[in-house]
Structure formats: structure tokens, C-alpha cells
């Protein structure tokens, strides 16, 4: 009696320096149409519909927000970062951001923050990116400078305590738009000189080039939470009297110069994101004082579209210690206000401008509702993925 054997090869992924089975389709991609119990197809949830952006297509709209890990040494990432990001991205998000990554050593928040200010940093980032690509997943990097909130200890030790030089800090090199510190625990910043501004713009360009060499799919500029670029935008913090302070046009000058420098460095088909605190949340605590408000974010978004920014990623607060806000609850509301105002906005060199929403999005029902109500085009979750790396699968189960 003869037996018939069928050859079943297990092909590896092309272009990867080691063998790993080919993931096609990628984890997190949903079948369409969906089967139903009565044999009739059902509509695919918006959360699991693809999103096309310049030369990329994300297979779902569940994205991983940057999560600082405070686990690097001299800016170098370690096997921890591979385990942390690798364990999440391989389980199917449409896009995974690595943590806020400093463009200069003094641009870190803590001495243990990750960096990309040195060519030597590129190799480790490249290995992480290669792993993500080996799983047929996309990964982005958030480029950041901490500004006046730099040189602190990890927040699980103390929320804002100064990191002195004895423990690797740089309290005498902290910079901001003006001299006002965040609070009594933080360093008093030195007002950034015009030469310093140009140095930082160049550092963003150099970091972008390293990110491209490492193979990242998306670049995001960090303009939120009171860090350097965001602090220049806010009249509550920026007290300058030169061309980088005073009027709205002057206060956004720095971020536009960074955006232009980065956009001209990356390929035309690469999406450019920008994270922003849509409001300082000082309306209640400082109602008679100028601050950054959602109306300013909408105004800036329209300008950013002309400068080639594809996504405005909505967060809030972080600029002033007098802020009064409800953690997470209001961020999707702000995102909805922005999206409604710019829903037909076209990006120079790209398509429409997209809006990302984050904050307290812990299950598929919440994420789907935000998309159905047109509050955003994609959702971002951070700590939820830290709690459950399989959040994409959990959201799929939420939506049956």
C-alpha cells in the first residue's frame, strides 16, 4: 500500500537576517467580510478596517502609544525593550510606537531614558525594527526633547524630583523658552538661545536620519506634555519677547521649523505625525491668563497640514503645574473637537489629515464608538498594552 506525501514548506521572511516563519497575513488583520451565524456576512468594525496614509497601509486602527520605560543606559536600549515592544507589536497593532526618544542627551526626561543622538544607538534600534518587520508589523519612533522637564528621576521613584549630577543628571543644562521651572522640584531652566534653537533643529534632523537608517516606518514629533516644543507654543509658559515669543505666529515658529526640517529629511511617502497637548487645561484655574487651548490646536493643525504633517495625535495638559483636568476622560473629547474642525483638511504632499485619540481606551467598544462617532481616525493605547500585550485580540473579542 503506497502513501502519498505532500510537501509543506515553512518559508522564512525575506530580507531578515535570521530565520523566522512568514506572517502573512499579519496578526491583527481581520477577514472581510466577517462570517455570521446565519451565513450572512456582517459589517467589519471600523476599528479593524485598514487605514491608508501616504505610502503605508495599516491593517487596523488600533495603535500603540509611546510608553517611557526608564530602562536605558546612556540612551542605549536593552533586551528589555525588545521584550517589551516585541511582545506587543507581534500581536497585531496597526502601528506600534517605541517610547519617547531623546534627540540629545540633555533632551532626556531621566538619565535612564532612551536616545537616538549618537550613531551608535542606531544598531540596537535597527534590531528592534527588524524584529517588528519580521512579524509583518509596522513600528514608529517619537522624537523628543524634554526641555524644562528634563533631568528628573524616574517617576516610579518620585514624580518630578531633580536628578543631580551625582546620579547622572544635568540640572545646569536644562533649557526652556523662559526661566520659569515646572515646580520647586525641577531645575530652573536657562532660556534657550537662538543658537540653541538651531542646534536642536539640527539634532532633530540628525535623529531623523538615524531613525531612517534603523528602518522605522513612521516619525512622530513630540509637541506635548510641556516638553520643549510644546512649552514654546504656550503663552502660559513662553515669556519670550523675541521672534519665538509673544504672538501665536511667533510661539509656533520653533515647531514649524522642526516640522519643515524633518519633513524635508524623510521620504515623500513616509507619514509624519505630531503629538500635541490640545489644551493646557488652565481655563478653570487661570481663567484670566493666556494659555494654549483647543482653538489654538485647531488653528495650528490647519497650518501643520500645509507643512506636510499627516496626523495630529491628541493628548492634553503637562505645560503648567496649575492645570485642572480629568485624566484621560477629556482627551478623546478634544480629539473629536479637532477632527470635526479639520475633517476635510488636505495635507500638502499627502491625503487628508488624520486625528489620533488616546486616553482611557481600554476595550473595543470604546474604541469603536469613537470611530463611529467620528471623534478620530485611529485610537492609541499605552498602559492597556502594558497590562495586556494581546489587547488587539481582546478588542476583536469585544466586538465579536
Image (cartoon, rainbow, N blue to C red):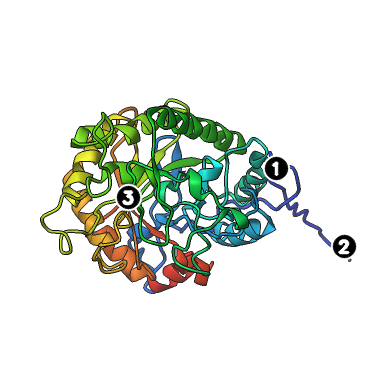
Tell me the crowding category of disc 2: few under 14, some 14 to 19, or many 20 or more residues within 10 angstroms, Cα based: few
Location of mark 3 (residue): 180
Are the residues tagged 1 and 2 within 8 Å (C-beta)? no
Q: What is the secondary structure assignment of the residue under circle 1?
A: loop
Please identify the residue farthest to the right as the structure is shown. Answer: 1
Q: Is residue 150 left or right of residue 251?
A: right
Residue at the location (55% across, 31% down)?
A: 209
Q: Which label's residue is closer to the chain start, 1 or 2? A: 2
Task: Identify the mark at residue 395; answer none if there is no mark.
Answer: none
Image mark for residue 16: 1
Q: Nearer the viewer, mark 3 or mark 2?
A: 3
Q: Position of residue 271 (x, y in %)?
A: 42, 37
Q: Is residue 377 left or right of residue 209?
A: left
Residue picked out by circle 2 = 2
Judge by depth and name the residue closer to the eye, 399 or 384. Answer: 384
For this orientation, the residue located farthest to the left is 288
Kindly tell me whether residue 141 is visible in this rendering. no
Q: Along the horizontal axis of the image, is 224 left or right of 103?
A: left
Q: Quadrant of the N terminus?
A: bottom right
Counting from the top left corner in percent of width and height, residue 75 is at 61, 48
Q: Position of residue 241 (x, y in %)?
A: 23, 34
Cα–Cα span, label 3 and label 1: 49 Å
* Label 3: which secondary element: loop
How far, Cα to Cα, is label 3 from label 2?
85 Å
At a point 70% along the width and 42% down the height, the residue shown is 16
Dot 3, how many residues are within 10 Å of its Cα: few (below 14), some (14-19), or many (20+)?
Answer: some
| Front: mark 3 or 1 | 3
Amino acid at each position: 500500500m503506497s502513501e502519498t506525501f505532500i510537501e509543506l514548506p515553512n518559508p522564512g521572511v525575506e530580507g531578515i537576517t535570521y530565520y523566522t516563519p512568514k506572517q502573512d497575513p499579519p496578526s491583527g488583520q481581520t477577514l472581510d467580510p466577517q462570517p455570521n451565524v446565519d451565513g450572512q456576512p456582517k459589517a467589519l468594525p471600523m476599528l479593524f478596517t485598514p487605514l491608508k496614509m501616504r505610502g503605508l497601509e495599516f491593517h487596523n486602527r488600533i495603535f500603540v502609544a509611546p510608553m517611557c520605560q526608564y530602562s536605558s543606559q546612556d540612551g542605549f536600549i536593552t533586551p528589555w525593550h525588545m521584550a517589551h515592544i516585541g511582545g506587543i507589536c507581534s500581536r497585531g497593532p496597526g502601528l506600534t510606537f517605541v517610547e519617547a526618544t531623546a534627540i540629545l542627551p540633555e533632551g532626556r526626561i531621566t538619565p535612564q531614558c532612551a536616545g537616538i543622538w549618537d550613531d551608535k544607538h542606531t544598531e540596537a534600534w535597527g534590531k528592534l525594527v527588524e524584529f517588528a518587520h519580521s512579524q509583518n508589523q509596522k513600528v514608529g519612533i517619537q522624537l523628543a526633547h524634554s526641555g524644562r522637564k528634563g533631568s528628573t528621576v524616574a517617576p516610579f521613584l518620585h514624580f518630578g524630583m531633580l536628578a543631580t549630577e551625582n546620579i547622572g543628571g544635568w540640572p545646569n543644562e536644562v533649557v526652556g523658552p523662559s526661566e520659569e521651572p515646572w515646580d520647586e522640584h525641577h531645575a530652573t531652566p536657562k532660556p534657550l538661545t537662538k543658537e540653541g534653537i538651531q542646534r536642536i533643529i539640527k539634532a532633530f534632523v540628525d535623529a531623523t536620519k538615524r531613525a531612517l537608517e534603523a528602518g522605522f516606518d513612521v516619525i512622530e514629533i513630540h509637541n506635548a506634555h510641556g516638553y520643549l516644543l510644546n512649552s514654546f507654543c504656550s503663552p502660559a509658559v513662553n515669556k519670550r519677547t523675541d521672534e519665538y515669543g509673544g504672538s501665536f505666529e511667533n510661539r509656533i515658529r520653533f515647531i514649524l521649523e522642526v516640522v519643515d526640517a524633518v519633513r524635508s529629511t524623510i521620504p515623500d511617502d513616509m507619514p509624519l505625525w505630531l503629538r500635541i497637548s490640545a489644551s493646557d487645561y488652565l481655563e478653570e484655574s487661570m481663567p484670566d491668563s493666556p494659555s494654549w487651548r483647543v482653538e489654538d490646536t485647531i488653528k495650528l493643525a490647519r497650518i501643520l497640514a500645509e507643512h506636510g504633517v499627516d496626523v495630529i495625535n491628541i493628548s492634553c495638559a503637562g505645560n503648567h503645574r496649575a492645570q485642572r483636568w480629568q485624566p484621560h476622560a477629556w482627551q478623546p473629547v478634544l480629539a473629536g473637537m479637532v477632527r470635526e474642525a479639520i475633517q476635510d483638511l488636505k495635507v500638502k504632499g499627502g491625503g487628508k489629515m488624520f486625528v489620533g485619540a488616546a486616553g482611557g481606551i481600554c476595550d473595543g467598544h470604546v474604541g469603536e464608538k469613537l470611530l463611529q462617532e467620528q471623534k478620530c481616525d485611529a485610537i492609541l493605547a499605552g498602559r492597556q498594552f502594558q497590562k495586556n500585550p494581546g489587547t488587539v485580540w481582546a478588542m476583536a473579542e469585544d466586538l465579536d
